[in-house]
Amino acid sequence: MSTQAQPELARKSAKAEVCKVAVLGFGTVGRAVVEILTYRHPAAIKLTHIFNRNVASKHVSWVPKDVRWTEDIDEVLASDVDLVIELMGGVEPAKQWVRRALESGKSVVTANKQLIANAGAELIELAQRKGVLLEFGASVAGGIPVLLGLQKGLSGDQIFKITGILNGTCNYILTRIESSGVTFDSALAEAQQFGYAEADPTDDLEGYDARAKLAILARVGLHAQVHPEEIAVSSITPIQPVDFHYANLLGCTIRQVSSAALEGQRLVAFVQPAVIPTTSPLARVRGSENVVISTGKYGGETAFSGHGAGGHPTAVAVISDVLLIAQQRGTAQLTPAKKQELTSEVTTPHYVRFVVRDRPGIIAHLAKVFSKYSINIDAVFQKPGFAKTSLPFVITLEACGRSVLDEALAEIAEADFHVEPPLSLPILKETN
């Protein structure tokens, strides 16, 4: 080969190695991803298409002129792009589009937690069959590389428990109530004002967002197959400032806790607000931050923490996955998941807050019902200064099962002295 031909060959080889990328969705995360691809210019990555509905309204002048804007998904999937970045959200039509991309020989990067939680197993299997890659590191905890850490960094350990704070919206609301004493509604309004909460925050507040992430973590870290809707959830909406006052008397605070643990052949999984010690790593997570703590048989506890929400932190995780694929170091292969018997039944002490029209005999009535269900009262707390017509007080209970407590509270709820339904929260002495 002549020396004159070698530079030409090198140029052709370099050109062939360029990874052409299409971005589906130009919302908060999609825009941030395109910003990084435009201004950072990652080596060997070439943005060629941006897809969005009503795409004309999305045009920005700083995107390179040679990038094709389109609202025709068929155009993208029929193009010569090597990799599709799916940032549309939701299960459908994202699932259909990702499946078509994989079937056509294109690798996929997604930040779509609902898609991976509900259809991840079948999409991973399809990617393996087609010899392409599916990466979803941004689907849990945004910019925190927890999935990569569990899948690769801790693959030598035998992880049996994953606990964390997986929803920045809920954590922002709860820590605002805790620090400032504002009402739940005021804290939610602030979260929406600052962009931490959606206009419709139902998925966050009811625990649906966190349980989708927990299902992914269980799949990757515990190799346990679980559908998100099988995981028990409880809402944070009943939490008010008075609950933090009482929790403080116990040396505790309140957080939305997500937990999945292997116990023999069972997977114990739940997402719920819980009373936790102020010494817990979960209690130290402030604002919209996330934390995931894995516990392994050999390596003990490993914590992953940082900003789990927001366009740019999530975009960083997306770009990291893109670079892994472009460098041919990514992998869609996971240890096969096993279906486990699933339960949310955990025997723990409980915090139960009542708001009542005060009168003699209320405590005696409650004690009688709890005794009927073999539930022992540990302590009673009543802070002064509240009106007798709407008096909050707290009873802490010794360790009991959730299902038994629910039966007791159903009977207690029939009494006529309640101003609002009782609020029960598990007291989790160990949250890692």
Image (cartoon, rainbow, N blue to C red):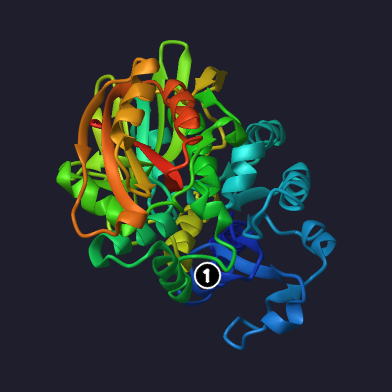
Q: Is residue 347 visible?
A: no
- Of the 4 image quadrants, the one containing the C terminus is top left
**Residue 70: image location, x then y, percent:** 77, 73
Farthest residue toward the bottom? 61
Q: Nearer the viewer, residue 86 or 161?
A: 161
Q: Is residue 78 visible?
A: yes
Q: Decide: few, some or many residues near mark 1? Use Cα within 10 Å; few <14, some 14-19, many ≥20.
A: some
Q: Secondary structure at mark 1?
A: helix
Farthest residue toward the front? 360
Identified by mark 1, the residue type is Leu
> At 77% from the left edge and 53% from the top edge, which residue is drawn?
93
Q: Is residue 18 left or right of residue 421?
A: right
The number of numbered discs placed on residues in the rendered structure image is 1
Q: Quadrant of residue 58?
A: bottom right
**Residue 232: image location, x then y, percent:** 52, 33
Residue pointed to by mark 1: 37
> At 60% from the left edge and 67% from the top edge, which residue is drawn?
46
Q: Is residue 328 left or right of residue 147?
A: right
Q: Nearer the viewer, residue 76 or 384?
A: 384
**Residue 256: image location, x then y, percent:** 38, 46
Q: Quadrant of residue 379?
A: top left
**Residue 251: image location, x then y, percent:** 15, 43
> At 35% from the left edge and 15% from the top edge, which residue is drawn?
374
Whether residue 86 is situated above or below residue 150 in the rendered picture: below
Whether residue 154 is situated above or below residue 77 in the rendered picture: above
- Of the 4 image quadrants, the one containing the N terminus is bottom right
Q: Nearer the viewer, residue 87 or 183?
A: 183
Q: Is residue 121 left or right of residue 351?
A: right
